[in-house]
Amino acid sequence: MTADARSAKTLLARVQQSAERFTEVPLAASCLHPAAPFDDAERAAVYRAIYERRDVRNEFSDRPIPDELLRRLLEAAHAAPSVGLMQPWNFVVIRSPEVKRDIHQAFTHANDEAARMFPDYMGHQYRALKLEGILKAPINICVTCDRTRGGPVVLGKTHNPDMDLYSTVCAVQNLWLAARSEGVGVGWVSIYEDADVRAILKVPDQVVIIAYLCVGFVDQLYDRPELEAKRWAKRLALDDLVYRDTWGG
């Protein structure tokens, strides 16, 4: 028997053992509740959080975030939907000034490279933008995805293996919207070499870095996305992005 055949046989045996241990239990009526719509005020609050969410860069206050508030934000992230209920995320909460400085140095190196990629007229505008708040934000959070969680076969990943990555992004968005409702700003830093941040935070090989977030109280927000307010880009019209039944339909 080849090594591949032995491996497949072992995996099949594990699946069979799991199936034998599983006993289907009828869903208890107590697990269900009415799917009634929110009232007007509740619904308005949800949409307000969505439309007023901003990618905060350097407007952070130096006010510390209470532990109980941080816990609420992490609980909101942890309540995100995940494929097969595998919950692939972890949250590295960073307060250390030394770690922040190392991350900021990694950002600065990558940001200098990025500025050179744009044409001259855009490169000047790019350098004028403030694209992170790593040092100023009281808390940084690195959100990761453990691609091995749930074992070799996960419900929902059998034919789309990247669903765990998308699940983790849902956790980021949950945290972002909850933060807006608490008067807390969040900035998503994406300009860095993965290997640099991985080494600084000691992230294992099987874990993917999904988001590096700067988190802190803010006193003011732009009335539109900052890059739109600073004329870097324009918001696209929704009607140009919606098709019927088929691509382009």
Image (cartoon, rainbow, N blue to C red):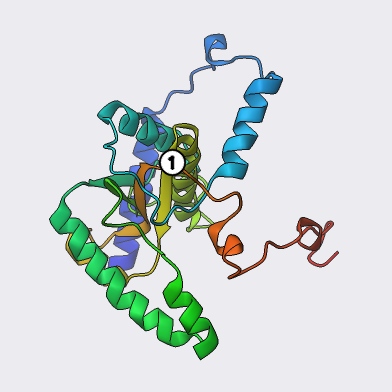
Please state the horizontal and vertical placement of residue 124, each as a whole percent of the image. 47, 82
In the image, what residue type sits under mark 1?
Asp
Q: Which residue is drawn at 16% across and 50% down?
A: 96
Q: How would you rate the neighbour count of disc 1 (Cα within 10 Å): few for under 14, some for 14-19, many for 20 or more? A: few
Residue at horizontal 50 percent and vertical 90 percent from the top: 120
Q: Residue furthest top?
A: 30
Q: Which of 223 and 110 is in front in this view?
A: 223
Snapshot quadrant of residue 61? top left
Task: Where is residue 195? Give x, y as percent.
Answer: 26, 71
Q: Quadrant of the C terminus?
A: bottom right
Q: Quadrant of the N terminus?
A: bottom left
- Tag 1 residue: 219
Q: Is residue 225 visible?
A: yes
Q: Where is residue 37 in the image (x, y as percent from the top left)?
A: 70, 22
Judge by depth and name the residue closer to the eye, 69 or 90.
69
Q: Is residue 51 above or below residue 123?
A: above
Q: How many labels does the image show?
A: 1
Residue 38 in sight in this render? no
Res 130 → quadrant? bottom left
Q: What element carries label 1?
A: loop
Residue 56 in the image: state x and y as whole percent.
Answer: 44, 52
